[in-house]
Image (tube, rainbow, N blue to C red):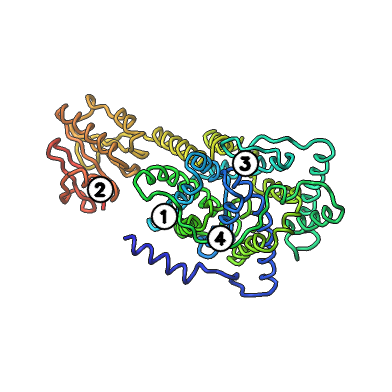
Amino acid sequence: MARTTFSSFTKNLAITDLRWMPEDGFSLGRLRIELLSGLTVALALVPEAVAFAFVAGVHPLVGLYAAFLVGLITALIGGRPGMISGATGALAVVMVALVAQHGVEYLFATVVLMGLLQVFAGVMQWGKFIRLVPHPVMLGFVNGLAIVIFLAQLSQFKVPGTMVDTGHGMGGGEWLSGQPLFLMLTLVAATMAIIWVMPRITRAVPAPLAGIGIVAAVVIGFGLDVPRVGDLASIEGGLPALHIPMVPLNWETFEIILPYAVILAAIGLIESLLTLNLVGDMTNQRGGASQECIAQGVANTVTGFFGGMGGCAMIGQSMINVKSGGRTRVAGIAAAVFLLLFILVGSSVIELIPLAALVGVMFMVVIGTFAWNSLTILRKVPFTDAFVILLVTVVTVMEDLAVAVVVGVIVSALAYAWNNATRIHATTRESHTEKGAKVYEINGPLFFGSSDGFMELFDVEGDPDTVIVDFAESRVVDQSALQAIEALAAKYEEAGKTVMLRHLSRDCHSLLLKAGQLMIDSDDDPDYALAVDYSVRTGILGGH
């Protein structure tokens, strides 16, 4: 089965998914937009990768190499053109404990195992389960992530060099004040204003790139004393080299890295698949979930062998790319290549870029990412949906994305189960085919949540000798439902009465077969079969 699935994946990859240019064909104008979009994303990736490396407690190049390798591989074979992947804060906060206790070599081994687990998830097509995430959870996810992105930028308003290693990543630090703070805020506001105005003037250059370029030119030209990329760390380095993780190959190592690998794989896939859905909504694309899982897995496995900290899809950079016009794989590939060029030959120039310009870009991403309409619909949607939106938003900010999504899905599922549990009811009438028989017409699904309510619908003592339960407007869903039917039949048998079940759907019919009941033909209704459980003298009429 896995072989067929993987073969199907590679076939789709070769035929349909390597969309280097839009369907309307190649043009120099489109290529220019894709390359400029990639350049914009690469500039925004630099401080993010460095910052997340500090959070994880590793060298900045470990984060930059991860951004390059993960970004390049997912751009080549990912499930959705236009998505950007790289080192992320959601993964970094999990990595910091591993690095602090066992060292960076164990991190590299963990990233390799994380990638293998993600490949397995993709081959098994588990990515399709992302469709079970309800819309309120998605709204809470984007709102929470927008707040997280905003909060992450606040560290740029601290005096460079004052942050310290707290043992749980870089923290502390002295806040800017007075004239330096005023100048920083002015440049941030100027960047945001340029990004807002630029599309109204021309779309020849992506607005975020124009904002970064103009503000950087002003800062460099006037020699303004503001925090710059180089104040975070030097990004100069060489090509990532093959590096086998230097850890003992034994069971003890596996026990150390496995829990971290599972958590990182889950967080990475959840964030990547939710980002895939968001980008899909913006670019009108569908599918690719399992392919994205495999791409993320391959990228992380390779990254672990080249000294990178691993990563996943980045909603902020993906939004920058899409809103800058990036729609194909060219933009993602260009972003990765530009990032590598920054490391190899352009570090001296990139380190001069003011952090204020990049913060301004990310603040505009926050504004564009936050689902502002969710604030108005909170009063219009059911209370449960409003509660889930707020809950997922808060948990995303306070804990992490994976926990927030799981909590949101569980709460939504429980609310759905409760709503369906209260829907079950019955109407009664006399049978037209069985003389003296009473018919219970069941409405609503019969499952674990409604089984108690189902039992309360019947008057065993007051009913006639023959009772017919009609499921034309209901469904038998699970084992709890079967148990309820058996318990009902046992009660009627104990009272010396017979109960018959009619109009069961095909899937209900299958459940009864699995329960060990015998199917025979029914003379009174040739379109249905009769399931007879001899132990309780019960007739059950099931549909084809």
| Residue designated by label 3 | 148
**The residue tagged with tag 4: helix, strand or loop?**
loop
Q: Give the mark, 3 or 1, whose residue is nearer the N terminus.
A: 1
Q: Position of residue 537 (x, y in %)?
A: 14, 37
Residue at disc 2, secondary structure: helix
Read off the residue under disc 2: 509
Of 459 and 272, which appears nearest the observer? Answer: 272
**Residue that numbered label 1 is attached to:** 116
Residue sitting at 23 percent across and 25 percent down?
462
The residue at the point 76 percent across, 46 percent down is 227
User: Would you name the residue on which mark 4 appears?
Assistant: 240
Q: CA distance from mark 1 to mark 4?
A: 20 Å
N-terminal label among 1 and 4: 1
In the image, residue 38 lies at what x, y percent?
65, 62
Tell me how far mark 4 sits from mark 2, CA to CA.
59 Å
- Residue at image coords 60%, 70%: 22
54 relative to 335, above or below? above
Q: For marks 1 and 2, give the CA distance.
A: 40 Å
Which numbered dot is residue 269? none
Work out whether mark 1 precedes mark 2 in sequence or the reverse, and give the earlier one: 1
